[in-house]
Amino acid sequence: MKYLNMKGNCGIETATTSTIKFKDGTSLKPQRMRTNTNAYKSAIENYLLDCIDIDGETNGTPTVKIQYFFDRFESEFNHSYEIHRTPNRQDRIADYLQGLPIAIDFYYYKILKVAKTLLQVESFTDKQEDKICSNWWNHCAFHLIRLQEKYSA
């Protein structure tokens, strides 16, 4: 493992990709990127837009792709029975996503790989992995709704 020696006013003695050790003996593990940062929002936006292909074409504008996704959602899934069964729109979209209408990752190891890339971390604890996998569909649904609000005129 490579160490980055940093001498100076910051008080950091050594740093690795997993921990930062200070001169006073304390250490700090770098935190993963928060999901409310602009960098994360941009990364998940790009990921979701890349997952949407229109009739085999992945080269559409974000507005066209989002409109295409929600038009399909309305025609294929969002009927009165579903609205009555699941009143929450985000939950309905999450249910729809589980049917794989777009090329979104669905295997746990691929979900975790995408999460590591989006959050810019090397690994997760078992508890974090479980939480990421169990919330994956709702998380993607939330960001698709956010994209619809962003790109609708």
Image (cartoon, rainbow, N blue to C red):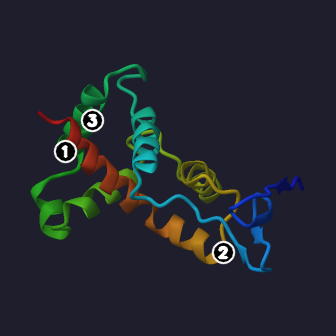
Q: Earlier in the sequence, mark 3 or mark 1?
A: 3
- Percent of width and height locating residue 16: 79, 59
Residue at point 75% right, 58% down? 8
Secondary structure of residue under mark 2: helix
- Percent of width and height locating residue 132: 52, 66
Sort mark 2 into few (<14), some (14-19) or many (20+) by Cα contacts within 10 Å.
few
Furthest residue toward bottom: 25
Residue at point 18% right, 69% down? 85
Q: CA distance from mark 3 to mark 2?
A: 33 Å
Tags 3 and 1 touching, CB below 8 Å: no
Residue at point 76% right, 72% down? 22
Question: Residue beneath label 3, please?
Answer: 66
Which mark, residue 149?
1
The residue type indicated by label 3 comes to Ile
64 shown above or below 83: above
The residue type indicated by label 1 comes to Glu
39 shown above or below 28: above
Is residue 96 visible in the rendered structure shown here? no
Q: CA distance from mark 3 to mark 1?
A: 10 Å
Comparing 101 with 25, the one in front is 25
Q: Quadrant of the C terminus?
A: top left
Q: Earlier in the sequence, mark 1 or mark 2?
A: 2
Which mark, residue 126?
2
Q: Quadrant of the N terminus?
A: bottom right
